[in-house]
Image (spheres, rainbow, N blue to C red):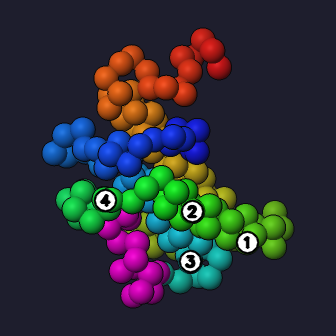
Amino acid sequence: LLEQAAALPDEQLDHLFDSESNSIGALLLHIAAVETAYQAATFEHRDLNRDELQQWEAALTLGDVARKEIRGNDLDYYLKRLEGVRGKTLAEFSRRGDDWLDEEGPFWGDQPANNYFKWFHVFEDEINHRVKIRWLRTRIAGRPRAAGVRPPSAR
């Protein structure tokens, strides 16, 4: 993820490709917000509290609210938020054994799901947004691929 965002100027972090798109900055913050919500749900067996929702709601929901509210931050802001959230996730994972992954709890529509499935969803969401960030970088740069993003044959 950090490779996708590396060295982006602030104006590219806020760039909106069209009236329906999300900025790269908003997508980076969304990744941190989703992970924060799943930390609360799986590590603490609760929903986000009022303060947490106020802090993360625009990033969780994206769309119009995010287009208005998530602007004007530099890359370091987003990277520090991501690193802080990921640090907590890794610390919490290190406190749990593999049996924790099998623990079930309510998920979408109160359907049962284990922690493995829930965290798979978090990682899948991040991968999806990495692809969007890569796509946006190439479009913002106005060339076939943005600097630092290697073509598939070079990977």
Q: Alpha-carbon distance for marks 3 and 2?
A: 19 Å
Amino acid, disc 2: Lys
Report if the CB atoms under discs 4 and 3 are less than 8 Å apart: no
Instruction: Answer whether residue 89 is visible to the viewer in this image.
Output: no
Residue 92: which disc? 1
User: As shown in the figure, which amino acid type bears the numbered disc 1?
Assistant: Glu
Report if the CB atoms under discs 4 and 1 are less than 8 Å apart.
no
Q: Which residue is mark 3?
A: 40
Res. 71 in view: yes
With respect to residue 99, does 71 lie above or below? above
Task: Report how far apart the C-alphas of labels 4 and 2 lie in the structure.
Answer: 16 Å
How far apart marks 2 and 1 lie (CA) works out to 18 Å
Query: Which residue in the protein does label 4 denote?
Result: 71
Magenta stretch bounds: 48-61
Q: Secondary structure at mark 2?
A: helix
Q: Position of residue 92 (x, y in %)?
A: 73, 72
Q: Amino acid at mark 4?
A: Arg
Residue 11 position in % (x across, y down):
32, 45
